[in-house]
Amino acid sequence: MTRNEIREILMQIMYEMDAARTMDLETARKLAGEKLPSKNLQRGITILTGIVEHLEEIDASINAHSRSWKTNRMSKVDLAIMRLALGEIKYGEDVPQAVAINEAINLAKKYSTEQSSKFIHGVLGAIVNASQEQ
């Protein structure tokens, strides 16, 4: 299974958890165990754990850098994609920021709209730029 396929599964898990309002570690681990192959399970759990444990911080960062939409009004797909990208950037072990952003844009093009891919690019780019200025 490629990293792109794993990323898609992780995005779907984030979407499913948000839609069911079950953003907790137990659910993340359970869904990862069901959906990810064993050789990729630990990496997936590491990223999901980082996202769930720092969800408020991630969402606050998204809200601070989104000009027009806040997380409570965003498409759940777009939000799952941005959370995943930030999880990979902050809690993944070996994903460069530019790669995480590019992969998020590709996921948005596949699962959302062209406008969403531009929106996601803008928000993630602003977050990364702000973190580099600190």
Image (cartoon, rainbow, N blue to C red):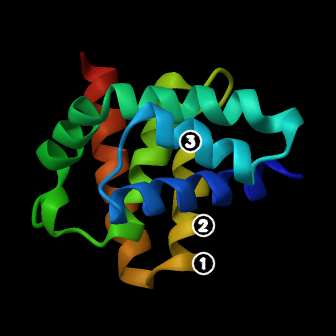
Q: Are marks 3 and 2 in contact (CB under 8 Å)?
A: no
Q: Residues within 10 Å of mark 1 (few under 14, many from 20)?
A: few
Q: Quadrant of the C terminus?
A: top left
Q: Residues within 10 Å of mark 2 (few under 14, many from 20)?
A: some
The answer to whether 35 appears left or right of 131 in the picture is right
Q: Name the residue rendered at 36%, 35% in the picture.
A: 128
As drawn, 21 above or below 53? below
Decide if residue 118 is on the left or right side of residue 105: left
The kind of secondary structure element at disc 1 is helix
The residue at which mark 1 appears reads as: 110
Q: Which mark is residue 98?
A: 3
Disc 3: CA contacts within 10 A as few (<14), some (14-19) or many (>=20)? some
Numbered badge on residue 106: 2
Q: Are marks 3 and 1 in contact (CB under 8 Å)?
A: no
Disc 3 element? helix
Q: Nearer the viewer, mark 3 or mark 1?
A: 1
Question: Mark 3 belongs to which amino acid?
Answer: Ala
Counting residues from the start of the chain, the first of labels 3 and 2 encountered is 3
- Residue 99 appears at what percent x and percent y? 62, 44
- Contact between labelled residues 1 and 2, with CB atoms less than 8 Å apart: yes
